[in-house]
Every structure is written in structure tokens, then in C-alpha cells.
Image: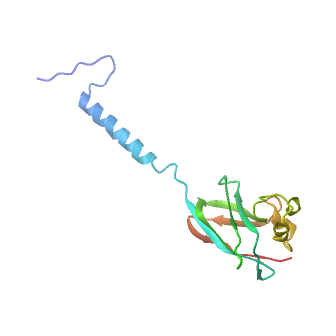
Amino acid sequence: MLTHSTRAGLNPAPTLSRLTLCLLLTALVTGCGAGVDEVPKGTVKGTVKLDGKPLSGARVNFTSGTAGAGAYADLQQDGTYAISDPIPAGDYKVYLSSPGLGDAPPDESGNQEMKDALKGVPEKYQSDQSTDLQTVIKEGENTFDIDLKP
């Protein structure tokens, strides 16, 4: 005959059941927590035009306060760009800068080519503080074409 001793107010459940319950809970917590840190990410590509003509020699910048991320790509001769390394999904402000300058005004560089990169681009599109260009990056591939008017 099997008997269980009980201590004041404790459940007399057998030790094997407690061990099984512990292992099951550990597996559940570990299995469910694996995807918690994963954030949806996406890539973005597009074309930048100024008054209908491809813009080249500049850099297109994406910054997000909500996703806490940023990325950039240099414009090609045909005005295309591609950010192929995935960035977190979210809302992004988009602005243009000279390559290598980030958010610095183009006149702070002695390089004439860098100064000319933003020639004709309205100033409001040259800073993350003043731009009104915005996009939402979703999981997967995204396209964001820009046609600036002087």
C-alpha cells in the first residue's frame, strides 16, 4: 500500500508529476520566447527624380524615430537606389544629402562634386528636420519612388 505524507497545507502530488510539470513549463517558456525579439524587416528600392529627370550623385537617407533605425543608399546615374540590407519595418522620414555628408549642409565640403549633388534640390528635402517625404517600410520588398519639384 502506497501512502503519501503531507506537510501542513502542501499538495501530496508525487515527485514525478512535479518534475514533469517543471519540464513542460520550461519547454513552453523557451519555445514561446524564441520569436519575441524578432522584428519584421524589409528592403527598399526606388528612383529619385528632380522635375521628372533622374537625380544622381546624391544620397537618399531613411530615418525612423519609431523603429529606432536608419539607412541610406547612394543614387546611381539613372536615379535608382537600393537598400538591400533589411531595416526594421516602420515609419520613415526620407531626405537627400551629398554622399558622405549625412545631414551636413553641402557648403561645408570643399568638394565641388559633393556641392553639385544637391543642385536644384529644394532645401526642405535636405534634412530630416524639414523633409515632408515619408514612407512606411513593410516586411519584405518595398518600392519608394520620389519625384521632387523645384
Among the 4 quarters of the image, the one containing residue 148: bottom right
Outermost residue on the top side: it is 8
Among the 4 quarters of the image, the one containing residue 24: top left
Q: Is residue 55 left or right of residue 11?
A: right
Taking 122 as reference, is 70 above or below it? above
In the rendered view of the protein, which quadrant contains the C terminus?
Answer: bottom right
Outermost residue on the right side: it is 107
Q: How is the image coloured?
A: rainbow
Outermost residue on the front side: it is 111
The residue at the point 24 percent across, 31 percent down is: 16
In the rendered view of the protein, which quadrant contains the N terminus?
Answer: top left
Taking 8 as reference, is 22 above or below it? below
The residue at the point 76 percent across, 76 percent down is: 55
Q: Position of residue 49 (x, y in %)?
A: 76, 78
Taking 49 as reference, is 64 above or below it? above
Outermost residue on the bottom side: it is 52
Q: Position of residue 111 (x, y in %)?
A: 84, 64
- Which of the pair 150/11 is nearer the observer? 150
Among the 4 quarters of the image, the one containing residue 107: bottom right
Q: Is residue 106 left or right of residue 136?
A: right
The residue at the point 76 percent across, 71 percent down is: 57
Q: Position of residue 27 (x, y in %)?
A: 36, 42
The residue at the point 75 percent across, 75 percent down is: 56
- Which of the pair 35/49 is nearer the observer? 49
Q: Position of residue 30 (x, y in %)?
A: 41, 43
